Amino acid sequence: MPPAPDTETLAWASAAVRRFAAATNLLVAARRFRIVGGDPRDAAVLRHLLTALGAHDAEPPGHADRPHLVDQLWCLGTPEESTAAVEQAADRPRGATLVVVDAGRHLPAVDEDAFGPVAPARPGVLAVPVLSDDVFLVSTGRDPEADPAAEARLRWARRSMPVARSVAAELRDGGLLRGTRVGVAMFLEPKTAVLSLLLRDAGAEVVVYAHADETDDAVADALRSAGLTVFASSTATLPEQQRLALAMLDTRPHILLDDGSHVIRLAHQERPDLLPTMLGAAEETTSGLRPLRTMAARGDLGIPVVAVNDARTKTFFDNRYGTGQSTVFAVLDLVDGLTSGAHRVVPGGSAVVAGFGHVGEGVALVLTALGFRVTVADVDPVRALQARFAGYAVAPLVEAVRDADLVMSATGVPDTIDVAVLRACADGAVVAVAGGVDQEVAVDDALAAGAERRPVGPKAERFVFPEADGGPIVLDGGGCINITAAEGNPVEIMDLSFAVQLGAVRMLLEHGDELDRAVVPIDPAVDEVTARAALAAFGSPAVPLPTGTAGLPLARQPGTGGVGPVRLPEQPADREPDVRTHRFGDPA
């Protein structure tokens, strides 16, 4: 095992990867990368970090002479060697995106003028049309432009969502959505906007709602300019948000796509007359499904709700890799904006993850990759045992936080970080929520117990209890940090989740009248279609179809820029197993 990197090099590599992610909103895991030039020790640390986050080194040791198709070219050396590497890597099939990352540690490693005129593709990303329509430059040494550039961000998101595009094309070609009104109630940013436009292009009438703290006003305006009806404003008060949500419901959508199930529940509370006219809804979060299952158990759920969150191609990827990357990166970006003496978080420090479900697994994985020593706290002994087998220390939460530099809740359960846990946190420890629900950090209880909120930086407040001189720093009031302080999950991850949402829409269109008024599992065929399309988009072959199965997505030939149309498989007939044992010879 190589020696641990020095903290300064680790901090540089961490910052470089996070700046790349903030500029592009792209995924690190599953992408192929190559590192060009630079100090071998710096390159080794960066390579270790990228592979620990799930990326694939496209240049195995001893094979530097073999060109490989890569998604990301990380440049650390001189502009001259970077230029040659970029020109070689730019020879690629049409539609295969290459992001060139200038990660020079001390000086720029890429000469942007060497490739002819460049143009903004989105804030922080430059297009290089002379080389290719699919080559882009990112510098980790400068801050992205402040211009929201909503239309450009929508185009960027769309190009990185081939799976959702292919599923939407199938809906369009089948004419299933004509005459259907779809309500979208989600975090309003570029990826959700693309989903809304794909639904519109497939034939639906689309109406959109978003909570104030989940609304990008520039994106909302871009959708309005495209002809969609949008009920959202980042400045709306709580009563105004309810009026906006009710106004969206009053358009009488046939299908509702929700995130957190707040609008589904609002329809039951305030617009029960709407329910008999609906085909159903789809919910994509763990925290949103919990109250819906309670309603169903009580007989109070008036429509079928497809459990998008439970799809394997959602939970295994969105929750683990998407939320893991986006929440940890958002937390550390906010910490970077604080005065160094105001907090305890340092490279190689200690972190606690509360909850070891799929989100907790992802958060722990990313923190470990970034050099943190991770302790997991979970009230479920089986989950705690899983964490122990995964190599993490395990302890009760109130004990684990006493010496922690960073505490992240990943349960989606209110009062996870309760007053006792907040009191137990060390002065300057940073507390944040990955995903989450209201009051996952018990802010109201802390205030009732006499805690004082003292701002210490953007979206950061120190909670000081009466008997203490200091206290922990809570980020963004305990809000869902990757949504309220960043751009949400990476584009490729939401491509998978939204492909499943579109599969749920198809289920409701074809079978809504037959489904129980309950939380309904996603059709397993949706998972298979989504996974096969994603494998094609990532450049990996899928396992051949079993005999008798037809019509799954086909990868386009290189140069077409995506995957082909998607059709649900015809499942082969199940064959009953032979229940007799042959271990002792053939039965008579």
Image (spheres, grey):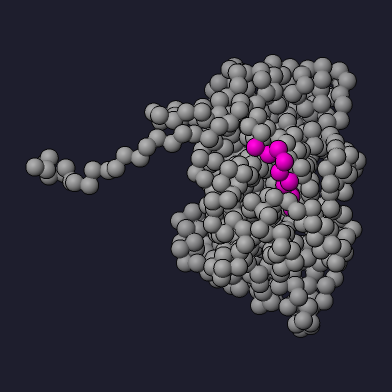
Compared across the picture, whether 474 is left or right of 217 comes to: left
Residue 485 seen in render: no
| Magenta region, residue range | 176-185
In the image, is residue 181 above or below residue 24? below
Give coordinates of residue 83: x percent, y percent: 77, 20
Residue 248: horizontal and vertical position, in percent?
Answer: 80, 55
Q: In front: 540, or 457?
A: 540
Q: Name the quadrant containing residue 473.
A: bottom right
Report the front residue among 239 and 463.
239
Q: As drawn, is 447 to the left or to the right of 426?
A: right
Viewer-closest of 345 and 173: 173
Query: Is there any visible trace of residue 303 in the rendered image?
Result: yes
Question: Does 293 sit above or below residue 423?
Answer: above
Q: Where is residue 552 in the image (x, y as percent from the top left)?
A: 52, 30
Residue depicted at 74% across the width and 17% down the height: 87
Left or right: 505 in relation to 130 = left
Question: In this orientation, which residue lies closer to the viewer: 55 or 297?
Answer: 297
Q: In which quarter of the image is the C terminus?
A: top left
**Residue at 54% of width from left, 57% of height from top?**
516
Location of residue 534 in the rendering, given as x and y in whole percent from the top left corner: 59, 34
The residue depicted at 55 percent of the width and 29 percent of the height is 553
Residue 178 included in the magenta stretch of the image:
yes
Q: Can you name the residue that lies furthest to the left here?
A: 588
Circle count = 0
**Quick check: is 214 in the magenta stretch?**
no
Q: Residue sitting at 57 percent across and 37 percent down?
A: 530
In which image quadrant can residue 158 be found? top right
